[in-house]
Amino acid sequence: MGIMEGKRGLVVGIANDRSFAYSITESLVREGADCLFTHLPGEKMQRRCLKAISGLGIEDPWLRPLDASSDEHLDEVFESIKTDFGSIDFLVHSIAFADKDWLQVGKFAATPREVFNQAIDISAYTYAAMANRAADVMPDGGSMLAMSYYGSEKAVPGYNVMGVAKAALEATNRYLALELGPRNLRMNVISGGPLRTMSSMAVGGFAEILDWVEQKAPLHRNISGSDVGNTAAWLLSDYSAGITGQVVYVDSGYSIVGL
């Protein structure tokens, strides 16, 4: 029996089979979880998400459109979960956004106000917005998880406003953990090493980041999606019942290196 047997939860963020959300779902399904999904609005995004989910052997998935910047959309998704299932046990928040035109080396200082605010909204605020709603359909407690990167605490050339947004995400996680802990709700973040995803390829100089990590990380390799997926399954399971408010690094050890 898998460590997630009998648990049901929502995964937000599957874009294709190279996303962190996909790898997390792969591990969750292997461990026995029942996963619900959302996709960005539009038929094209629905088809893309369904294609990825079908690759995991999931037939006829629970799938709803979600514009995470819309409170109305968020309400609709969590109301549908309550109506259809009554409750869930976990939430995976694996979404982030910043205008790729401003994710280039040397362009941080000039970031427009609207680009800055949108990055914070989609990448950080939506975690709090989802957690607040998810808490109402997790009456017996549960576990929630978001995704970050080391650029939240160290300046990574080209990561720019996304680094600021991820720093806000990690702070949000700590305050959620403090406030929701008495309701037996655990909140954690995985800081994953660089991985070739649709989002990461928008960061200027990403290939150089991959090369640098491979050279300098203690394990002398970049991570795989399954490294993150397996850690996520553990954090969402009862095996990590005493862990909350943490940032767990899955980065081949790169974050411990000084030079």
Image: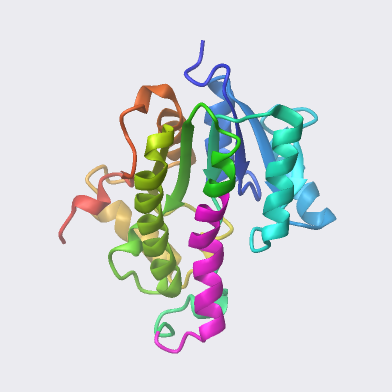
Q: Give the range drawn in magenta.
A: 109-130
On whether residue 195 falls in the magenta region, the answer is no
How far across and how far down the image is residue 141, in percent? 48, 30
180 lies above or below 97? above
Q: In terms of image quadrants, where is residue 164?
A: bottom left
Depth check, front residue: 165 or 258? 165
Q: Which residue lies furthest to the top in this view?
A: 1
How far across and how far down the image is residue 168, in percent? 40, 63
229 lies above or below 8? below
Depth check, front residue: 113 or 153? 113
Number of marks in the rendered image = 0
Q: Which residue is painted at 45% across and 89% down in the image? A: 110
Q: Which residue is painted at 76% across and 54% down in the image? A: 45
Q: In which quarter of the image is the C terminus?
A: bottom left
Q: Is residue 17 left or right of residue 50?
A: left
Depth check, front residue: 233 or 244? 244
Residue 189 visible, this orientation: no
How far across and how far down the image is residue 55, in percent? 70, 34
Residue 60 visible, this orientation: yes
Q: Residue furthest right?
A: 43
Examine the residues drawn in magenta and state their main secondary structure: helix
215 lies above or below 28? below
Q: In terms of image quadrants, where is residue 149?
A: bottom left
155 lies above or below 25? below
